[in-house]
Structures are given as structure tokens and as C-alpha cells.
Image (cartoon, rainbow, N blue to C red):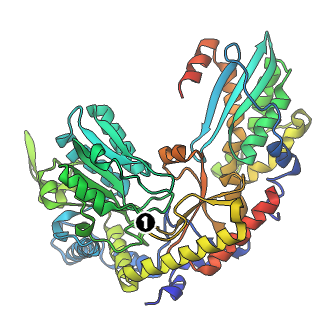
């Protein structure tokens, strides 16, 4: 609808309606972390299975709005099979894309433009329109922060976190 | 004054959003305020401001007079037997509950004592008791909500057994449900409990009389009843307030201070440490006068008719696609409509509605235990006040249809 084309791109709606890599993985051995967006009640659970230095498999469960769900779905496709170093880079690049607007909200002027390589984001670039809707940025970054959590934890912490809720 | 034409009194509602007339349906979260409230506050600052309870000069006396006049007006508005002593100005309803928990609660609740809450409470009337329960080792009990979105009182007597405090909403901010508060309070008193009413949702919309409610404490916020932010009210029974220890310490709340101690001031100043929100009190006084001029019976009747129109219009147009989480008719129900439309997430729904100029709230509405009880993580909530009319409901319906076609 007029005014919302940048937010609700067709590819986003497609991933929302047909989320990829939806489900759970046995944990352990898979790592598991939960993320919450306290403002809107969205929650996401990310399961990742590592094979040495590679993110071998990923599953996402939880519930949320079209932006958080499609972002999680797009993310799962983008990181599956990648090396951990590549995954870290992608998380960084995605969050940089999402922070452009937030940073500009600060003082409006003089922010260093973040150098983005659009090719490195592929389909994820569809989420760029979200930055025009600041309230929704947290929806888009929820699954990414949760993925980062699974990677940052050692296995013991990951299990502890999964028992918290 | 005529409610049907009062919208013109609200300057904020003259604007457009995304090129469309603003349709404000989020008054359960915070209302807008009429020009007379803004003028009263401006006039106070422009002509009268000085600190209260301190000065002997003319404008200080006038500031004092306006501040205390607001207290009396608020007291009369809720039928307080002793408005000059029993109406305490706080920061908001949340702080008022915290005040009761921190003073009456700490003085009267011991490990093992039980506090009875309900499934429908706002976090403001939950978390202070969770905090105190953790600190004091209290038992929290819950009046359950039945599937018809009303409180199930079938086990009330058993739940009340040994309870020291009952803290209950007078209108759910999620469902619009108006619980049979007076009945609960009567049973609670028979069981020897003290009763706190969370009136944040009902005081702005229903005639209120603390004697008829039968509560011992009543809390509410000015910003939900056409008044400013930054001020709320605690009404308490005078004997309870007298016996309670003070809340915050500082200037104004003391009668005497020595190096080895202090004695507290008389009511209500005992609970108003530091410079109070004077202009806000003046604004609240003006809001109360405005509501009085509309007449709270008339306000309730108007909103009930509008709610009936909304329930009818939305149900007829959307049928099973639209689920209204709350009572399906206007009996014992306020103008709060929590909506679940198809499987569109409330956040997405609110985004599309915003594009149509319609302001609704999406989220858990600070009632997470209730959301869990209903098995949803969030709802989109439309809520009405005196400045809304049937055309707002029609716009809401149009916007829902737009959302349906976008996410269809």
C-alpha cells in the first residue's frame, strides 16, 4: 500500500508467509538461544549446529511480526553453510545496515556513512527499507542478535540460557 | 456541554498523519487533552508560579490555593469523604501502587502472608507486589479469568482465606472488562483484607465513588483522563494513611527534623516529599472540571454506545476473520477493543493502520501474564474516549480491510 512499499517488499512478505528453516534442532548438540523484543512481545529461538568452523545447520522457531519473521528466515538462508568468520561478517554488515538510521537520529549530521557492499547482502538488502521505520528496526535485528548470542556463548552457557525461560 | 462536538476542544486532533485526518484510538494508553487544560497550566506558569507550602507572598499563596483546589476537585470527583487529607498526588498510578506496597505493605505484610491479585492486572499492579513478595516472602494468589474474559469468582472465598491485601483492577486495559469490584471488595473485607483498586482505566471513563467501590486505596493517572503527564493520584482511607510510614523523605513531608530523627507532616503532605507537580495538579484540576461539565454518566453512556457500534460494525464486516479479545457486548465493559485480525501480527496491523492515520497500540499492553493466559503474544488495541465517534470506527474498519488485502 502507498507509503509502505519500502517496508513490505514482496520478498519480505514471501518469507513471512513461507518461512525457511523453520523448526528446532535437538539441543544439545545444537546450540540454542532465545531473543525477546519486550516492546511487541516478539520472541525468536535460534538453533545452530556447528561442524568445526562451519555453521552446518540452523533452525528458527518463535513468533513475531512479518519483519522479525522474514528477517529470521532470510538470515537462516544466508548463514547456512557459511564459515563462522563469514557469519560474523554478515551479522556485522546487516546490523550496520540497520543502524544507519538509528545513528542519524542521534544528531542528524556528520555521521560517518557506513560502507556497505550490497552484493554481500543479497536478498537481505530487501530489509533495508526497514530503517525508514525506526520502531521496526528492533524487529529486524532480533534474530541476528540471537544468532550472535549462540555463537558468542560456549556450549555450557548456551545450555544454561536455554534453561532460563 | 455536548460530548458529540467536544472533539473541537482538542488541538492535537486537528492534525493529519500521512495525509489523512488523525484518528486517535489509543486513549487507554494515554489520552489527549483539551485546550482548557493546556490554558490552565499556561496561565499558572505565566501568572502564578511559586513553590507551594513555603511562601507568604501573594503569588505563592495563589499557587498554594490552586494546588489545593485541584486536590479538593479530584477528591470530590471520586467521592472521597475527606478530600483535603486523603488525596495524595504522586507521579502516576504506578508510583501510587508502589507507595502503598512500600509503606502499607512493608508495615503490614510478613513472610507467609497472602496477597490476592487477578489474571487481568496491568504490570503496574503486579510488579510492585512481585517485588514485595520477593522481599518479604509473601504468597501471591490470583483470581482467574474465565473463558468469557470475566473474572471467575467461584473460588473467591477460598482464595480470600487468610489474605491480607486484595489488589484488583476496576477495568482491564486489555479486555475492557469491568470486574464486579464492589462484590470482591465486600468479600475481601469480610475476610479481613485491605483492598486496593487500580482505577487507571475506569476513573477516566466511569462515574467513580470510592465508597460505592468499597476500596481502601484507589490509584489513577491524570494523563489518561485528559490531564497532563507527570501526576497521578493515590486516594486512601484516612485512618490507613495516618498509620502508614512515610514513602519518600525530604522537604515538605516533615513536621520537624533533628540531627537524630524527624517527625512526619500531617496528611496529605506526609506523602508528598519535595516540590510537587504543581502545574500538573492545576492541569488535572482543569481536566476534572472538563469531565464534570461533560458529566461522567454521559461520558459512560456515550462511550458505551460507541463501543456497541464498534463491536457491531467490526463483527458484521469481518466475521470470523476478526477476534475481539474481550466481552462481546457492552455489559460491564469499557471502550477497549483488543483485536486479532486473521493471523496478521498486531505490529504489522498497527503499521498499516498508522498509514491510514489510525493510532492503535500493538503489544502486550503491560499485561504479560494475561497475554500468556490467552495464548497470544500481542494484540492490536483500539480504545475510545469522548473525542472519538462513529466515523473513527468506520476508518478503523477501512484500515483493517486494507491490512487484510496487503497481507492476504
Depth check: B172 or B326 in front?
B326
Residue B231, can we see it? no
Depth check: A80 or A137 in front?
A80
Label 1: few (<14), some or many (≥20) within 10 Å? many
Residue B336, horizontal then vertical, whole percent:
52, 65
Position above or below: B258 against A89: below
Callout 1: chain: B
Which residue is depicted at the point 38% across and 75% down? B41
Q: Is residue A108 left or right of residue B231?
A: right
Q: Quadrant of residue B362?
A: bottom right
Q: Is residue B102 left or right of residue B313?
A: left
Residue B360, can we see it? yes
Residue B379, horizontal then vertical, whole percent:
60, 54
Which quadrant, please, contains the N terminus of chain A?
bottom right
- The residue lying furthest to the bottom in this view is B1
- The residue lying furthest to the right in this view is A119
Which residue is depicted at the point 18% across and 74% down? B57
Which quadrant, please, contains the C terminus of chain A?
top right
Residue B236, horizontal then vertical, whole percent:
21, 59
Q: Which residue is mark 1?
A: B223
- The residue lying furthest to the top in this view is A52
Q: Quadrant of residue A48?
A: top right
Q: Is residue B64 left or right of residue A99?
A: left
Amino acid at each position: 500500500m502507498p507509503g509502505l512499499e519500502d517496508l513490505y517488499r514482496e520478498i519480505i512478505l514471501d518469507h513471512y508467509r513461507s518461512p525457511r528453516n523453520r523448526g528446532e534442532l535437538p539441543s544439545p548438540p545444537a546450540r540454542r538461544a532465545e531473543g525477546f523484543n519486550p516492546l511487541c512481545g516478539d520472541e525468536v529461538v535460534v538453533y545452530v549446529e556447528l561442524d568445526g568452523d562451519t555453521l552446518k545447520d540452523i533452525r528458527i522457531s518463535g513468533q513475531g511480526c512479518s519483519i522479525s519473521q522474514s528477517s529470521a528466515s532470510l538470515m537462516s538462508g544466508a548463514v547456512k553453510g557459511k564459515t563462522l568468520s563469514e557469519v560474523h561478517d554478515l551479522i556485522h554488515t546487516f546490523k550496520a545496515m540497520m543502524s544507519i538510521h538509528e545513528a542519524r537520529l542521534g544528531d542528524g549530521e556528520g555521521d560517518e556513512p557506513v560502507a556497505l557492499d550490497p552484493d554481500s547482502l543479497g536478498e537481505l538488502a530487501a530489509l533495508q527499507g526497514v530503517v525508514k521505520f525506526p520502531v521496526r528496526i528492533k524487529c529486524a535485528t532480533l534474530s541476528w542478535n540471537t544468532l550472535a548470542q549462540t555463537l558468542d556463548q560456549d556450549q555450557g552457557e548456551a545450555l544454561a540460557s536455554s534453561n532460563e525461560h | 456541554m455536548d460530548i458529540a462536538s467536544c472533539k473541537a476542544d482538542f488541538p492535537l486532533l486537528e492534525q493529519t498523519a500521512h495525509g489523512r485526518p488523525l484518528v486517535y484510538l489509543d486513549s487507554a494508553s494515554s489520552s489527549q487533552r483539551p485546550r482548557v487544560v493546556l490554558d490552565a497550566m499556561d496561565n499558572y506558569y505565566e501568572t502564578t508560579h511559586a513553590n507551594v507550602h513555603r511562601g507568604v507572598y501573594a503569588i505563592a499563596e495563589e499557587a498554594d490555593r490552586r494546588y489545593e483546589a485541584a486536590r479538593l476537585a479530584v477528591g470530590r470527583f471520586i467521592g472521597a469523604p475527606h478530600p483535603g487529607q486523603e488525596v495524595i498526588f504522586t507521579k502516576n498510578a504506578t508510583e501510587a501502587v508502589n507507595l502503598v506496597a512500600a509503606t502499607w505493605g512493608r508495615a503490614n505484610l510478613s513472610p507467609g502472608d497472602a496477597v490476592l491479585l487477578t489474571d487481568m492486572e496491568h504490570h503496574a499492579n503486579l510488579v510492585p507486589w512481585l517485588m514485595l513478595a520477593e522481599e518479604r516472602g509473601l504468597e501471591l494468589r490470583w483470581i482467574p479469568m474465565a473463558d468469557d474474559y470475566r473474572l471467575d469468582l467461584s473460588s473467591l472465598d477460598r482464595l480470600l482465606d487468610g489474605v491480607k491485601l486484595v489488589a484488583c483492577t476496576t477495568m482491564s486495559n486489555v479486555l475492557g472488562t469491568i470486574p464486579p469490584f464492589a462484590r470482591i471488595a465486600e468479600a475481601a473485607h469480610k475476610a479481613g483484607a485491605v483492598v486496593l483498586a487500580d482505577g487507571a482505566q475506569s476513573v477516566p471513563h466511569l462515574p467513580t465513588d470510592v465508597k460505592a467501590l468499597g476500596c481502601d486505596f484507589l490509584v489513577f493517572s491524570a494523563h489518561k483522563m485528559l490531564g497532563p503527564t507527570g501526576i497521578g493520584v493515590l486516594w486512601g482511607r484516612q485512618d490507613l494513611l495516618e498509620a502508614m510510614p512515610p514513602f519518600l523523605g525530604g522537604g515538605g513531608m516533615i513536621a520537624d527534623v533533628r540531627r537524630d530523627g524527624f517527625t512526619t507532616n500531617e496528611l496529605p503532605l506526609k506523602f508528598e516529599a519535595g516540590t510537587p507537580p504543581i502545574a500538573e495538579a492545576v492541569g488535572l484540576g482543569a481536566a476534572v472540571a472538563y469531565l464534570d461539565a461533560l458529566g461522567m454518566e454521559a461520558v459512560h453512556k456515550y462511550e458505551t454506545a460507541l463501543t456497541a457500534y464498534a463491536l457491531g460494525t467490526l463483527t458484521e464486516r469481518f466475521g470470523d476473520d476478526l477476534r475481539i479479545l474481550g466481552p462481546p457486548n457492552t455489559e460491564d465493559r469499557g471502550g477497549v477493543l483488543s483485536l486479532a485480525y486473521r493471523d496478521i501480527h498486531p505490529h504489522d496491523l498497527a503499521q498499516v493502520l498508522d498509514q491510514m492515520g489510525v493510532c492503535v497500540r500493538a503489544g502486550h499492553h503491560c499485561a504479560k501474564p494475561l497475554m500468556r493466559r490467552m495464548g497470544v503474544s500481542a494484540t492490536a488495541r483500539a480504545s475510545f474516549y469522548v473525542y472519538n465517534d462513529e466515523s473513527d470506527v468506520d476508518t478503523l474498519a477501512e484500515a483493517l480491510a486494507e491490512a487484510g488485502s496487503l497481507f492476504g
